[in-house]
Image (cartoon, grey):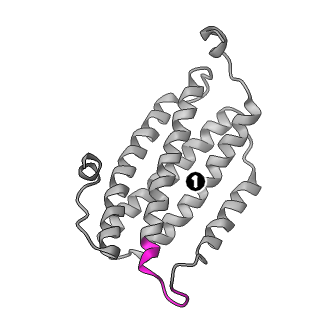
């Protein structure tokens, strides 16, 4: 396929609608999870950054909704509801404790949200690519969301290592140092 036929016009808008609705549903689930994590970590050193993360996730969901509206992509409410229910059901996971919260729960939650941030970043990168052929998208807003996701993941990677060290032992150190090992 030549480069000129690869670019130029939006292709597969119905698939983009599915893709965006899937990311919107995931955003809803992420907001629910971080809200729960914030309740768990009230009064801890994590509270201010979790508050910030929650506000940023809400902003990102708004940017995604605005992008969808600009492209005339309808929001599929059933996906939003399914995501909300899925997050509630995830609380029943087996974690070695039946009647109390396991220390493993904190680690799994921080790992999950760190991974979700990477997936969200990828979604905004995809929309940035779409913006190359679709002028209705706000490319600057998409760039801001990508940069914001990078900062979120940096913090979450460090916290995840800290929580893992608290659960299993070891010295957390910064995530970058672990990557260089």
In the figure, residue 45 lies in which quadrant? bottom left
Q: Position of residue 91 (x, y in %)?
A: 58, 75
Left/right of residue 73 with respect to residue 103 in the rendered view:
right
Around disc 1, counting alpha carbons within 10 Å, would you say few (fewer than 14), some (14 to 19), or many (20 or more)? many
Residue 143 at least partly seen: yes
Front one among 149 and 101: 101
Q: Residue at x 49, y 42 (%)?
A: 121
Residue matched to label 1: 27
The residue shown at (56%, 33%) is 126
Q: Residue furthest front?
A: 181
Q: Residue at x 35, y 61 (%)?
A: 49
Residue located at (60% from left, 54% from top): 26
Determine whether the residue tagged by mark 1 lies in a helix, strand or loop.
Answer: helix
Q: Position of residue 176 (x, y in %)?
A: 27, 49
Reply yes or no: does residue 175 show up in magenta.
no
Judged by its main secondary structure, the magenta piece is loop
User: Which of the two residues, 99 or 43, is positioned nearer the viewer here?
Assistant: 99
Magenta stretch: give its range: 97-106
């Amino acid at each position: 396929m030549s480069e000129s036929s690869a670019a130029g016009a939006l292709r597969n808008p119905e698939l983009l609608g599915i893709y965006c609705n899937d990311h919107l549903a995931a955003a809803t689930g992420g907001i629910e999870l971080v809200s729960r994590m914030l309740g768990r970590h009230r009064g801890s050193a994590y509270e201010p950054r979790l508050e910030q993360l929650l506000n940023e996730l809400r902003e990102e969901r708004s940017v995604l909704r605005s992008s969808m509206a600009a492209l005339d992509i309808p929001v599929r409410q059933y996906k939003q509801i399914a995501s909300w229910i899925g997050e509630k059901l995830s609380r029943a996971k087996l974690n070695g404790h039946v009647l109390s919260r396991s220390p493993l729960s904190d680690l799994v939650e921080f790992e999950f949200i760190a991974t979700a941030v990477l997936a969200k970043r990828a979604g905004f990168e995809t929309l940035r690519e779409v913006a190359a052929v679709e002028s209705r998208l706000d490319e600057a807003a998409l760039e801001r969301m990508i940069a914001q996701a990078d900062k979120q993941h940096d913090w979450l990677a460090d916290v995840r290592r800290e929580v893992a060290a608290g659960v299993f032992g070891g010295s957390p150190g910064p995530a970058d140092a672990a990557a260089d090992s």
